[in-house]
Image: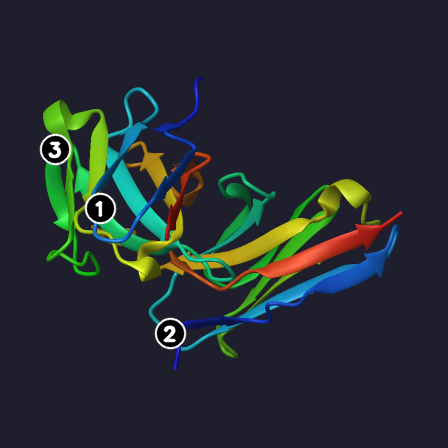
Amino acid sequence: QKEVEQDPGPLSVPEGAIVSLNCTYSNSAFQYFMWYRQYSRKGPELLMYTYSSGNKEDGRFTAQVDKSSKYISLFIRDSQPSDSATYLCAMFYGGATNKLIFGTGTLLAVQP
Amino acid sequence: EAGVAQSPRYKIIEKRQSVAFWCNPISGHATLYWYQQILGQGPKLLIQFQNNGVVDDSQLPKDRFSAERLKGVDSTLKIQPAKLEDSAVYLCASRRFGTGSYGYTFGSGTRLTVV
């Protein structure tokens, strides 16, 4: 079993739709949760991060963490064609190494 | 601030040949990571440096991969000899020691194709 599971998609939605992206994980020791956006032929860029459980909102983006269910989500409101990218969830335990464990990524296409 | 610089952007080699990638992190970032991203997968950590010391290389295939970070700044990742399954994007990331999770910055990567 992978430590972090993510539906690879692809996910295609019309412009203006609400997008829901999800990841599950197996290790309850994860403390920090992040969402990265990766455009084609580019490196991942940090979109949202959350420590422990709860919600965090930034503009059209909302990140949710439910540690009791080992489930994290990213919601995109009023999706735009410029949101078309691969979305990667990532998490780490904290401590000395701080290495990120990534999901496989979900490819999102927002159709104009 | 300038981002993480990587070169080359693309490389095509034959199997059993050797190849090297270069990374220049953001100035002042003490922690440097090399990740391997195979097509359709998330990045996987190969090695982490803290200044010029190795913190974690547990997933680095040491029979063929090597990495160094001289003087705690630039880093090189080498593969010798390359195998077909090494075809991937090699991403370098850096992080300022002591900051929170938002401190990771990735470069654009080097896309390696082994034929």
Find disc 3 in the rendering and name its residue: B52
Residue B17's mark?
1
Subunit that carries the residue with mark 1: B
Nearer to me, B84 or A102:
B84
User: Can see residue A76?
Assistant: no
Q: Do the residues labelled 2 and 3 touch (CB within 8 Å)?
A: no
Residue A92 lies, in percent from the top left, at 36, 58
Distance Cα–Cα, label 1 vs label 3? 27 Å
Residue at the spot of label 2:
A28
Which quarter of the figure has residue B22? top left
Q: Are marks 2 and 1 in contact (CB under 8 Å)?
A: no
Residue at the spot 60% in from the left edge and 71% down from the top edge? A7
Where residue A30 appears, as percent x and y from the top left, is 37, 65
Q: Nearer the viewer, mark 2 or mark 3?
A: 3
Tag nearer the camera, 1 or 3: 1
**Residue A2 visible, this angle:** yes
Instruction: Work out how far the residue at label 2 is from the one at label 3, CA to CA, in angstroms.
Output: 32 Å
Chain letter behind tag 2? A
Q: Is residue B63 above or below residue B29?
A: below
Quadrant of the rendered structure where residue B90 is? top left
From the image, which quarter does the N terminus of chain A lie in? bottom left
Residue drawn at (28%, 36%) of the image: B98
Q: Which amino acid does label 1 sit on?
A: Gln
Sequence order check, earlier mark of 1 and 3: 1
Residue type, label 2: Ser
Q: Position of residue B50 (x, y in %)?
A: 17, 38
- Check if mark 2 and mark 3 are on a common chain: no
Residue B3 vertical position relative to residue B42 in the rendered view, above or below: above
Quick check: A92 above or below B113? below
* Residue A91 x %, y %: 42, 59
